[in-house]
Image: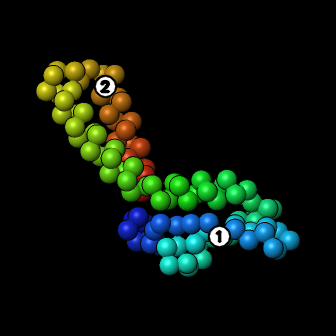
Amino acid sequence: MKSNDATSRPWWVDENKTTPNWEYKIKSQEGRHIATLNKYLLGKKSNAELIIRAVNSHEALVESLKDLLIHFKAEAESHGCMEARNRRRFQEAEQALALAEGK
């Protein structure tokens, strides 16, 4: 799934401790239910918050890494600094970027 096909962001955590299972509901910008974490299933608030941070920052991180790769790869090539170590680092960053983009 492409990130622009996903539920609109930002996502947020709706905390409900009135139930016996303590629920942390992940909701969309419009308040639509996305997922529920309870104390028996990954039920730490920190897990819900981590999911929220990862989803809400995903597109900005991907775009930033793309820009950095373009800039630093061009700089390394223009200064003759594309030895194997740098080439490997660029490949690793490109692989991470492809993974984040679902390619």
Q: Nearer the viewer, residue 98 or 44?
A: 44
Q: Secondary structure at mark 2?
A: helix
Q: Position of residue 86 (x, y in %)?
A: 31, 25
Give the residue type at disc 1: Asp
Q: Position of residue 47 (x, y in %)?
A: 66, 55
Per the image, the residue denoted by label 1 is 14
Residue 38, quarter of the rendered image = bottom right
Identify the residue shown where x is 30% and y is 22%: 84
Q: Secondary structure at mark 1?
A: strand
Count of numbered circles in the view: 2
**Quarter occupied by the N terminus:** bottom left
3D distance between C-alphas at marks 2 and 1: 44 Å
Identify the residue shown where x is 58% and y is 72%: 27
Identify the residue shown where x is 35% and y is 29%: 88
**Colour mapping:** rainbow
Q: Mark 2 or mark 1: which comes first in sequence?
A: 1
Asked whether residue 48 appears in the rendered view, the answer is: yes
Identify the residue shown where x is 73% and y is 56%: 44
Q: Nearer the viewer, residue 101 or 52?
A: 52
- Which residue ends up furthest to the right in the rendered image? 20
Which is closer to the viewer, label 2 or label 1?
A: 1
Numbered badge on residue 86: 2
Horizontal relation, residue 21 to residue 11: left or right: right
Residue 34, quarter of the rendered image = bottom right
70 to 45, vertically: above or below: above
82 to 18, vertically: above or below: above
Residue 39, quarter of the rendered image = bottom right
**Quarter occupied by the C terminus:** bottom left
Q: Nearer the viewer, residue 9 or 69?
A: 9
Number of residues whose C-alpha sits closer than 10 Å to that of mark 1, classed few (under 14), some (14–19) or many (20 or more): some
Give the residue type at disc 2: Asn
